[in-house]
Image: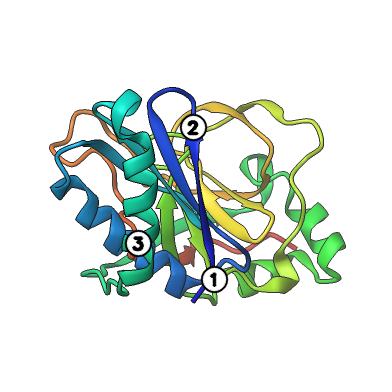
Amino acid sequence: MQRARCYLLGETAVVLELEPPVTLESQKRIWRLTQRLPDYPEVLEAIPGMNNITVVLRNPQSRALDAIERLQRWWEESEVLEPDSRQIDIPVVYGGALGPDLPLVAEYSGLTPKQVVELHASQDYVVWFLGFQPGFAYLGGLSPTLAMPRHAEPRVQVPAGSVGIGGQHTGIYPLDTPGGWQLIGHTSLAMFDARKAEPVLLRPGDTVRFVPQKEGVC
């Protein structure tokens, strides 16, 4: 079992953070703990992250130390959660004006742009957690060949629907925003729509597959 440490975050929350590595099994245990925590009356919100969970407390002044003790014990007792996973296909137009970093990713990985597309679209990805923006899913399962650093200087604006690579993850920008991920394509599928009863398309545990919509990337 991965060791965990707990600490205070600001004035209202505590964090349980796991030591490396980041694994899908540990994320599943984090999902299970996230489900369990709202049953504790002192918890306002439980927010899963990558190898961590943040717990916002109702009475942090008097309950923080107790919450840290409970978190540590609950982590040791936690089990893996196998969620009701959905298969979501994401149509993607790779390269071009909305995938401007595809040549850079190809050069970095030692592949052609066409090979990058084929490899990126050949994987099944799992939604590890949501963060950064409403509906921004961090997708695990990226081939190590395609892993690459973010831009040293983020773009001022990344269009909603942009498909990018950042470190060991791939993901889709739900909204127009500044961002530093390597952009390799674009989807017309909305990741977030505030008008819908369920505004966020993807949920932790979902399986995602990218489907190329046209050639012409090489």
Find residue 188 and report its horizontal and vertical position in percent.
41, 44
**In front of the other: 88 or 99:** 88
- Asked which quadrant contains residue 109, the reply is bottom right
For the point 47% across and 64% down, which residue is it?
A: 210
Q: Which residue is mark 3?
A: 73
| Residue at the (30%, 55%) spot, across then down | 203
Quadrant of the image occupied by residue 142: bottom right
**Color scheme of the displayed model:** rainbow
What separation in Å lies between label 3 and label 2 (alpha carbons)?
Answer: 19 Å
x, y percent for residue 9: 49, 32
Going from N to C along the chain, the mark reached first, 3 or 1, is 3
User: What element does badge 1 sit on?
Assistant: loop
Asked if residue 12 is positioned above or below residue 151 in the image, the reply reads above
Q: Position of residue 117 (x, y in %)?
A: 64, 67
- Rounded to the nearest angstrom, the CA distance separating label 2 from label 1 is 30 Å
Toward which corner of the image does residue 33 lie, by quadrant? bottom left
Q: Is residue 3 above or below residue 61?
A: below
**Disc number for residue 141:** 1
Q: Which residue is mark 2?
A: 9
Q: Would you call the spot at circle 3 few (<14 residues within 10 Å), some (14-19), or many (20 or more)?
A: few
Q: Amino acid at mark 1?
A: Gly
